[in-house]
Amino acid sequence: MNGDSSEVLGLLVRDIGEAGVEEMAGSPGLAAAVDQHVASLRDELGEPDEDALMDYLRAFAEEAFNRGWWPDSTRDWEFVRIVAVCWMMREASTP
């Protein structure tokens, strides 16, 4: 990916993740799915800081886009994973 497409990808992923985090408040099913992903990510990454989470998110999203994923379903695995990482980033930035 070149710099421009990487930046667009970052903005898109941030928008997806932030919208999903907001949606969790009214969707117990989404919140439960995100909780499962958060637990899996913690098993995989430990307690990562914001920078480590952003690096993971960029790599994850780039790989998903490269294999043809596009965010047209708010309930697919990739969407929930992105929301989980964004939720963890929000938690990591809260003192």
Image (tube, rainbow, N blue to C red):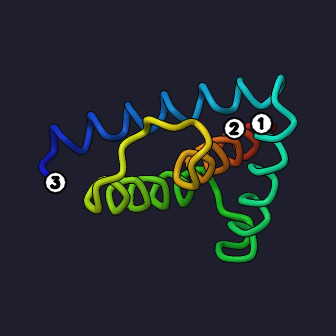
Question: Residue at 49% across / 51% down in the picture?
Answer: 54
Is 49 left, or right, of 64 in this rendering? right
Neighbourhood count class around disc 3 (C-alpha, 10 Å): few under 14, some 14–19, many 20 upward? few
Which residue, given by chain and number where applicable, does mark 1 sit on?
94
> Neighbour class for label 2 at 10 Å: few (<14), some, many (≥20)?
few
Look at the numbered discs 2 and 3 and tell me whether their residues touch, using CB distance below 8 Å: no
- Residue marked by disc 2: 90
Question: What element does badge 3 sit on?
Answer: loop
Residue beneath label 3, please?
A: 1
Calculate the distance from the C-alpha at mark 2 to the C-alpha at mark 1.
6 Å
Labels 2 and 3: the sequence-earlier one: 3
Q: Are marks 2 and 1 in contact (CB under 8 Å)?
A: yes
**Eye-nearest disc, 1 or 3:** 3
Q: Which element is circle 1 on?
A: loop
For residue 61, above or below residue 73: below
* Residue 49 percent location from the top left of the image: 64, 56
Of label 1 and label 3, which has the lower sequence position?
3
